[in-house]
Image: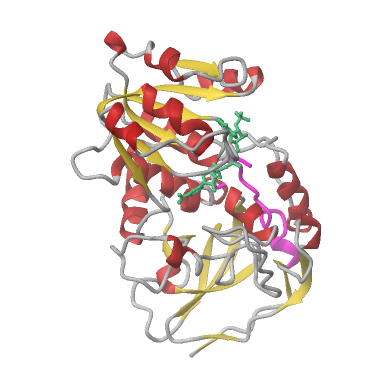
């Protein structure tokens, strides 16, 4: 055990009331000590994800059951500085800059599934919307040297998921001059756009907003389609690729509402990564036969491994990639406003992680108060 004895600090917890307004700001949290395998972190930034909204509303992955978990510290993404480590922790030391990793206590190369997701930070394990956090060491990796705390805080959930989509399937890693399609301006999609641009791939994006289309182009999208004006965007998007052969990668975050267009847009033997369900229920579910009819690979994936997170951190440093941040930054007391901003889809960019990549840099301005 390592003595820690933090001052009193602020953190956000789930309460018995579901919904964003049910989130509870605790003003006098404290941590007395950390266990042998634990690490005490002074948090500097956190970034919201769709997952955080889902949890606040009482959802669990794979179901829509309402399961409040009162007292759990919310938030899955964050960054900070280590203040103390337990006796058995060998890979970190006080003073190290870290980012969180969604799912700990499994081997570093273990694939994540919906069952393990239930134990993720902010869902089954105390999370990041706190001025000090106590984490199992396997829930952390070293932060990129080249990023601020705010930028680094956007990497864990949506960033890692996007990295896994584009690099996680052996033999299909995204390459220079390939074509990638991303959907909308949420955390996963903006991260995927930036990762693809960083390797020299060509990106086509969809969005519902003319204003956001401009931002997508600034971030490097070659073409942008409005999915409200052109609900059947699959064939028009494909027409942007040389010879109209289709995309090497389609990063699908809409689920049944978008998969039908995604398989029309992808090229023969290209990869459609099915990641989310933001499009809501569709009139018809897309049959598995769509993969046969369009001769493509459809790959479901959940977040990524801890080793992929380390690889992603190295990628970010090597490529000099700077995650796009939301225009708004909130202090920790205003985290609920950030949740509402994300709920209303006003954030952009942000990845995952986060209304910014929206970064909810909740702790940033509060250090001096601790
Ligand atoms: N599999 C995993 O491990 C994993 C990890 C992270 C997230 N996810 C899932 O991936 C999805 C995205 O997460 P996120 O954090 O990126 O969400 P987010 O930041 O909340 O994304 C919001 C944006 O999605 C876009 N969008 C909504 N419906 C769309 C549609 N029908 N077509 C295209 N774009 C649409 C909108 O973009 P515009 O405003 O530009 O229209 C909206 O602003 C969620 O379902 C989340 O649960 C899964």
Looking at the image, residue 110 sits to the left or right of residue 283; the answer is: left
In the image, is residue 4 above or below residue 354? below
- Residue at horizontal 36 percent and vertical 42 percent from the top: 165
User: Which quarter shows the C terminus?
Assistant: bottom right
Magenta stretch, overall SS: loop
Is residue 344 toward the left or the right of residue 148 in the image? right
Residue 150 in view in this figure? yes
| Position in image of residue 363 (x %, y %) | 67, 57
Colour theme: secondary structure
Q: Position of residue 270 (x, y in %)?
A: 27, 30
| Residue 263 placement: quadrant | top left
Task: Let me know if residue 9 is in the magenta part.
Answer: no
The magenta-colored residue range is 353-370
For ligand 1, give the image quadrant: top right
Front residue of 111/128: it is 111
106 over 312 or under it: above or below: below
Q: Residue at x 46, y 21 (%)?
A: 221
């Amino acid at each position: 055990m390592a003595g820690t004895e933090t001052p009193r600090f602020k953190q956000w917890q789930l309460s018995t009331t579901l919904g964003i307004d049910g989130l509870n700001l605790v003003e006098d949290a404290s941590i007395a000590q950390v266990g042998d395998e634990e690490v005490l972190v002074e948090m500097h930034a956190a970034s919201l994800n769709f997952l955080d909204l889902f949890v606040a509303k009482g959802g669990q992955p794979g179901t829509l059951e309402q399961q409040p978990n009162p007292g759990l510290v919310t938030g899955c993404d964050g960054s900070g500085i280590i203040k103390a480590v337990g006796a058995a922790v060998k890979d970190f030391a006080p003073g190290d800059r870290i980012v969180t990793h969604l799912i700990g206590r499994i081997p570093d190369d273990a694939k994540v599934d919906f069952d393990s997701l239930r134990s993720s930070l902010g869902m089954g394990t105390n999370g990041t919307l706190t001025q000090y956090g106590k984490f199992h060491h396997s829930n952390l990796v070293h932060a990129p040297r080249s990023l601020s705390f705010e930028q680094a805080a956007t990497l864990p959930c949506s960033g890692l998921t996007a990295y896994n989509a584009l690099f996680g399937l052996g033999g299909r890693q995204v390459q220079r001059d390939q074509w990638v399609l991303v959907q909308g301006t949420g955390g996963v999609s903006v991260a995927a756009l930036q990762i693809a641009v960083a390797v020299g791939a060509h990106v086509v994006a969809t969005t519902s907003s003319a204003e956001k289309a401009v931002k997508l182009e600034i971030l490097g999208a070659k073409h942008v389609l409005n999915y409200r004006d052109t609900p059947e965007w699959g064939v028009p998007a494909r027409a942007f690729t040389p010879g109209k052969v289709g995309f090497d990668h389609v990063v699908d975050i809409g689920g049944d509402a978008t998969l039908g267009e995604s398989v029309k847009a992808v090229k023969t033997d290209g990869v459609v990564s099915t990641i989310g369900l933001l499009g809501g229920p569709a009139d018809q579910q897309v049959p598995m036969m769509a993969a046969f009819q369009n001769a493509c690979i459809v790959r479901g994936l959940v977040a990524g491994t801890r080793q992929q997170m380390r690889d992603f951190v190295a990628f970010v440093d090597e490529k000099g990639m700077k995650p796009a941040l939301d225009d708004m930054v909130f202090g920790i007391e205003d985290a609920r406003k950030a949740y509402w901003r994300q709920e209303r889809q006003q954030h952009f960019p942000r990845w995952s992680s986060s209304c910014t990549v929206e970064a909810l840099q909740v702790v940033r301005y509060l250090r001096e108060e601790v």
